[in-house]
Amino acid sequence: MAKVVVAMSGGVDSSVAAALLKQAGGDELRSSSRFANARVFDVVGVFMKLADLPNFKKSEKRARKIAKILKIPFLVLDLRKKFKKMVIDYFLKEYKTGLTPNPCVICNKEIKFGLLLEKALKLDADFIATGHYAQTNSIHSIRQEIAMAEIRRMEPVKLLVAKDKNKDQSYFLWMLNQKQLKRVLFPIGDYTRKEVEGLAKRFKLPVLGIKKSVEICFVKTTINDFLKRYLKPNPGQIIYSTPEVRYRVIGRHQGLAFYTIGQRKGIGLPKGPYYVLGKDLKKNTLIVTKNQKDLLKKELIAKKINWISGKKPELPIKIKSKIRYRHKLATATIKQFSRGKIKVVFEKPQRAITPGQSVVFYLPRRQAGAGEELLGGGIIC
């Protein structure tokens, strides 16, 4: 019997993931073809305490309750200091330099699939599991996921998008490596959110109707409110830019950290709307426009590139790409730019390409076989 540590947040997805692993192969699910001949895992639930906020306290209480219902051991991992250093401090540092970071990507790499995996291995676990909507190695059911777990230790792991494209979270996993992925299970990757909610009812888990979690777990209200608590305002000029009118001063900003590319609300200028077009960090100026077409760009430069396979593909290569989580996949070509950096050239211009955000690459379905395969990603310069 293999041992698996499940990251439990107290929400629907991670709770069902734990239930699937606990019940796989049991009497309740033998009738389902998805679970035929599946073996049972020795499951341990772990809650990661990341911050001293009410939402974490409530989540821990729910996760503990779910573990009790499932009759699995439950541990609390206090990662507050390391989470602050690795994620929150990174978040503030990037904003301070005028960038717009994605803390969830860093958290997945360093915390959920980093420190949690380290802890799991110390507990003699074979795998960790999460409630992420993603799939690996063309696996299309928990039964196959389990059956292939040992094989995956020897073969390269492919990371695929989830069955539920609207909930797919592969975008946030582009920084993972083979060492991590060989130890990971995604039990709900082959289910839609509706099916997951149905399983929660079937398992009689009291997790339905829970208020949706905030986008960034350590931010209580808005990002700007959070930033203003830690970053000193550094006011400067707002410059209006159009092809006809270049760099005309039309106002004052509160600090470049409080604005992001494409932003419309909160700029504080009359006779709008205006859109944030760019930032001049050296001159501490915010550049705005009234024409949304000015936000369209056909290429970007990315750094800190990670390839899921561990091997860089031969460039140039045609791929599908996302420049933010809710962005539609766009056809593009990756080219070598300089050492450690690449250029991504899109077939059609993309709106509000934002430095600090992640650009993620997928192999098109016809080339990947069973579904879109996540090749890797980078940080937009």
Image (cartoon, rainbow, N blue to C red):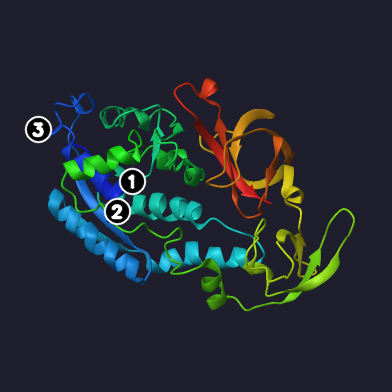
Local secondary structure at mark 1? loop
Between 278 and 209, the one lying in front of the other is 209
Q: Amino acid at mark 3?
A: Asp
Q: Amino acid at mark 1?
A: Gly
Residue at mark 2:
11
> Does the image show residue 208?
yes
Q: Amino acid at mark 2?
A: Gly
In terms of image quadrants, where is residue 249?
Answer: bottom right
Residue at mark 1:
131
Q: Position of residue 18 (x, y in %)?
A: 24, 45
Local secondary structure at mark 2? loop
Q: Answer above or below: position of 199 versus 148.
A: below
Between 308 and 212, the one lying in front of the other is 212
Q: Position of residue 292 (x, y in %)?
A: 72, 51
Q: CA distance from mark 2 to mark 1?
A: 9 Å
Residue at mark 3:
27
Q: Is residue 276 left or right of residue 164?
A: right
Local secondary structure at mark 3? loop
Asked if marks 2 and 1 touch (Cβ < 8 Å), the reply is: yes
